[in-house]
Image (cartoon, rainbow, N blue to C red):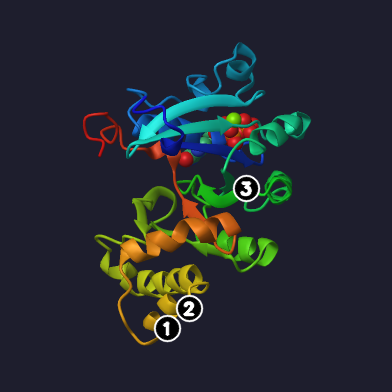
Amino acid sequence: MASNTGETIRNVALGGHSGSGKTMLAEAMLFKGGELSRLGKVSDGTTASDFDLDEKEGRKSFYSALLHTTWKSRDINILDTPGSADFIGQVYGALSVVELALITVNAAAGIEVGTRKAWELVKQQGCACMFVITRMDAENARFDEVVSALQETFGPACTPLMLPVGSGGNFRGVVNLLHPGEVPDTMQESVETQRGVLMESLISGDDALLERYLEGETISSAELERVFTPVLVERTVIPILCCAAEQMDPHQHTRESRP
Ligand SMILES: Nc1nc2c(ncn2[C@@H]2O[C@H](COP(=O)(O)OP(=O)(O)OP(=O)(O)O)[C@@H](O)[C@H]2O)c(=O)[nH]1
Ligand SMILES: [Mg+2]
């Protein structure tokens, strides 16, 4: 662990419908953080989170698992909760001790009963929230439709923070709208539009920044990051992320390469 002072600790719970990819996402986070040298799979019973024999055999989580990784000098505690309604008590427990909930939504199935339940509990417990659209590599993944459904169901505060590059068998990764980096030619326009939407949502509560933005001034990524945490805590912006945790690049882990 990099440090044990409270300031560096971030507590995150994964919630959402059973089978929406929480455990696999947790596995990818541990792998990316350098805690694991190899990416396990739920279907093989080899993930760090589903360590109980019943979970390995059942190919699903029965208990909340507490996991840990480090990222950019932060100690990240991850609580991977079970999605089955039978174990809902464990989700209550997890959400009552974290600052942030990541609600996973299957890119092919969209919003399910467990998605709504997780959202209700997030509101009850008052923690910050992000949606993660998972399984973007599945043939019938439909990012845009799921984003629209999230906005219709949970409100316009739901805003993409990432856009997928490709989908299904052509999924190649994501563009982070806060730090777009290299953008494929075919996505220049959509990235620009969605970055504008995200910026307006982020700065709408900061009059000075909003005024500068509307006057055409460039708002730096550092300034956007400064307003990111407060809007997240107030849930005036609910960022939408996406991933294909099973398709993690095996060369992307290692502690040495971590910032
Ligand atoms: N194609 C694909 N399949 C995935 C991905 N992530 C998870 N899956 C599959 O989806 C199934 C469910 O994944 P889990 O991570 O166990 O889902 P969960 O949300 O933890 O499910 P519960 O523990 O029952 O709540 C498994 O068979 C995974 O292999 C992904 O990125 N791509
Ligand atoms: Mg699980």
Q: Residue furthest right?
A: 86
Q: Which residue is found at the position 59% from the left and 14% from the top?
A: 52
* Residue underneath mark 3: 127
Measure the alpha-carbon separation of dots 2 and 3.
25 Å
Residue type pointed to by label 2: Asp
Measure the alpha-carbon separation of dots 1 and 3.
29 Å
- Residue 184, above or below 118: below
Q: Which residue is found at the position 33% from the left and 36% from the top?
A: 73
Quadrant the N terminus occupies: top left
Label 2–label 3 contact, CB within 8 A:
no
Measure the alpha-carbon separation of dots 2 and 1.
6 Å
**Rendered image quadrant of residue 54:** top right
Label 2–label 1 contact, CB within 8 A:
yes
Residue type pointed to by label 1: Glu
1 or 3: tag closer to the N-terminus = 3
Where's residue 169, x and y in %?
40, 48
- Tell which of 71 and 192 is nearer to you: 71
Residue type pointed to by label 3: Cys
- Residue 242, above or below 217: above
* Residue underneath mark 2: 207
- Residue 232, above or below 193: above
- Mark 3 crowdedness (10 Å alpha carbons): few <14, some 14-19, many ≥20: many
Quadrant the C terminus occupies: top left
- Mark 1 crowdedness (10 Å alpha carbons): few <14, some 14-19, many ≥20: few
Where's residue 213, x and y in %?
38, 80
SS at badge 2: helix
Q: Which residue is found at the position 37% from the left and 32% from the top?
A: 70
SS at badge 1: helix
Residue 142 in view in this figure? no
* Residue underneath mark 1: 211
SS at badge 3: loop
